[in-house]
């Protein structure tokens, strides 16, 4: 089942449909979940359904051909306001909420959501990249969140509740989006034409954590060659943490100047390492994980070199998972790379002593 072409989130659509039918729809929502699973598309469809001029909003089933639905699909609906972080900024600029300095309060999202609806019965505002809402931005939203204009709906989209300011979190209804099923990721990669080979789509889906975005990041060939190098170094009898830290740091730098791109790249590298140790734990104990042949060969060679047992591999896996948590808390990247690899070297250096 898919809700209006949105894969994997029927349960949320149903919950919102029930709330709408009972006239109990909240006025502010916080959508959270990993990047690349369709939260923004869901929010846009939700807005479209609430504004449709033909179908009752309680059905949450936009007709697709009324004036409102057509404008919503084209991104030109006068009652839908969307803001997102410009790529060159590190936070959502205040002007997006309040208007430019010379037009303060006469433009921007807060002004827009307070206007009388042009077409339908509601005004809807969507704040994408809510992870990048700073205290100033959050403060100017508080009044709107506390006294929402009649029949307005505000949707904030972020990756995790922990990345939102408490003042925002406590004033919104939290909606958690689950990662997509791996089959769904493979199907979407194919149907969107992002990948043409089914086996390749399935291979990417397997390491996507249920995110289309992550699957696409994995499609980059340089990522696969880095992964081979990483497995080689991690399985060496002595882990050269200083040398490897330099290579990882250079590889992360190659992702670009933007912090989110670098963070995503670093997360990818640690995820590869975590995956290696997870497989090691399984292969050193009773239940090896099945893999596609190409990866199997790379993994087996590395597993044969790795001198630790399942417990050592499990300790290394834990270090990787700790590090993944720290990346999301914006810790200093260079220091984090060094600390992570030093810890792995320490875990594995005890082997054989
Ligand atoms: Zn319609």
Image (cartoon, rainbow, N blue to C red):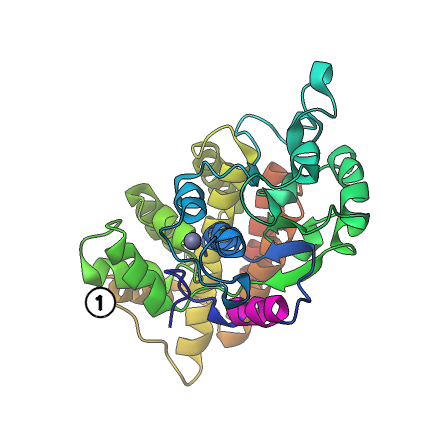
Residue 221, image quadrant: top left
Question: Measured from the top left, where is residue 215 in percent x and y?
Answer: 37, 54
In the image: residue 99, left or right of residue 129? right
The location of residue 346, given as percent across then percent down, is: 60, 57
**Mark 1 sits near ligand 1, with its Cβ under 8 Å away:** no
- Answer few, some or many: residues within 10 Å of disc 1's Cα (few below 14, many 20 plus, some between 14 and 19): few
Please say whether residue 14 is one of the residues in the magenta stretch: yes
Position in image of residue 322 (x %, y %):
63, 58
Camera-side residue: 8 or 74?
A: 74
Q: State whether residue 237 appears in this view.
A: no
Return the residue nearer the eye: 157 or 125. 125
Element type at mark 1: helix
Q: Residue at x 57, y 34 (%)?
A: 85
Picture layout, residue 88 above or below residue 312: above
The kind of secondary structure the magenta stretch mainly shows is helix
Residue identified by numbered label 1:
293
**Quarter of the image containing the C terminus?**
bottom right
């Amino acid at each position: 089942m898919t809700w209006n072409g949105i894969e994997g989130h029927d349960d949320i659509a149903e919950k919102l449909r029930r709330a709408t039918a009972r006239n109990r729809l909240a006025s502010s929502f916080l959508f959270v979940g990993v990047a690349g699973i369709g939260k923004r598309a869901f929010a846009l469809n939700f807005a479209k359904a609430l504004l449709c001029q033909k179908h009752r909003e309680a059905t949450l089933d936009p007709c697709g051909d009324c004036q409102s639905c057509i404008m919503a699909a084209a991104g030109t609906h006068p009652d839908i306001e969307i803001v997102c972080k410009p790529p060159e900024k590190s936070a959502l600029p205040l002007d997006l909420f309040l208007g430019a300095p010379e037009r303060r309060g006469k433009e921007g999202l807060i002004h827009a959501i307070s206007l009388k609806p042009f077409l339908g019965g509601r005004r809807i505002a969507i704040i994408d990249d809510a992870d990048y809402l700073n205290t100033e931005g959050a403060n100017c939203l508080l009044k709107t969140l506390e006294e929402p204009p009649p029949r307005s709906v505000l949707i904030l989209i972020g990756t995790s509740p922990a990345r939102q300011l408490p003042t925002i979190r406590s004033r919104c209804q939290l909606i958690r989006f689950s990662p997509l099923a791996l089959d769904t990721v493979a199907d979407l990669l194919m149907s969107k034409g992002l990948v043409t080979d089914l086996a390749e789509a399935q291979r990417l889906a397997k390491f996507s954590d249920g995110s289309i975005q992550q699957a696409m990041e994995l499609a980059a060939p340089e990522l696969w060659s880095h992964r081979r190098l990483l497995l080689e170094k991690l399985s060496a009898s002595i882990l050269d943490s200083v040398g490897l830290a330099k290579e990882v740091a250079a590889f992360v730098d190659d992702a670009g100047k933007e912090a989110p791109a670098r963070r995503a790249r670093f997360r990818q590298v640690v995820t590869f390492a975590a995956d290696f140790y997870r497989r090691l734990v399984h292969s050193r104990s009773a239940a090896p994980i099945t893999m596609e042949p190409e990866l199997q060969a790379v993994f087996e060679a590395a597993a044969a070199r790795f001198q630790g047992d399942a417990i050592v591999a499990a300790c290394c896996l834990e270090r990787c998972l700790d590090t993944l948590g720290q990346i999301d808390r914006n810790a200093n990247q260079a220091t984090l790379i060094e600390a992570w690899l030093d810890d792995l070297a320490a875990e594995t250096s005890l082997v054989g002593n």
